[in-house]
Amino acid sequence: MDDYIVCRCEDVSFDDIRHCVDESDTIDIHEAKLRLRVGMGTCQGRVCGPLLERCFAGHAIGTLERNSVLRPVLLADIASEMSAGKE
C-alpha cells in the first residue's frame, strides 16, 4: 500500500504522506499540503481530499481546503452575453 498514489495530480504516494505523520501518530493536513503539494493539482483536492480524510480518520488535524481555480459558468449566461453583444 506504500506505493499507492493518493494524489494523482501531484503524484503523491501514501508513503510520502506517511512521512508527514509526527511522533503522536497525527498528521497536519495543511502541513502535508505545503510540503507535498497534495490537493494542489488540477482537481484541487476533490479526489485526494476524501481519501486522506478516510485514511487518517481520527489522526488528522485540519482539512484539505479547496480553492477552486475555475468556477462553472452556465450556458444560459454565455448565451445571454453573446446575444447582448449582437445588439
Image (tube, grey):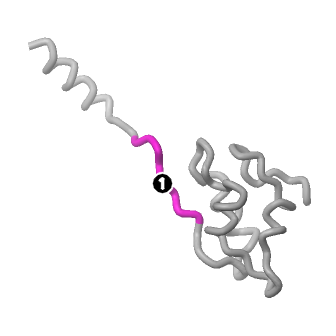
Report the quarter where the C terminus lies: top left
Query: Dot 1 surroundings within 10 Å: few (below 14), some, or many (20 or more)?
Result: few
In the picture, measured across the screen, residue 20 lies left or right of residue 62, that is right
Residue in the picture at 79% in, 87% down: 24
| Residue 4 relative to residue 12: left or right | right
The residue located at (65%, 52%) in the rendering is 47
Helix, strand or loop at label 1? It is loop
Q: Quadrant of residue 29?
A: bottom right
> Majority secondary structure of the magenta segment?
loop
Residue drawn at 59 percent across, 75 percent down:
62
Residue 11: horizontal and vertical position, in percent?
77, 46
Give the image location of residue 59, x and y in percent.
Answer: 73, 80
Range of residues picked out in magenta: 64-71
Image quadrant where one finds the N terminus:
bottom right
Q: Amino acid at mark 1?
A: Asn
Residue on which disc 1 sits: 67
Position of residue 44 measured from the top left corner of the image (x, y, whole percent): 57, 50
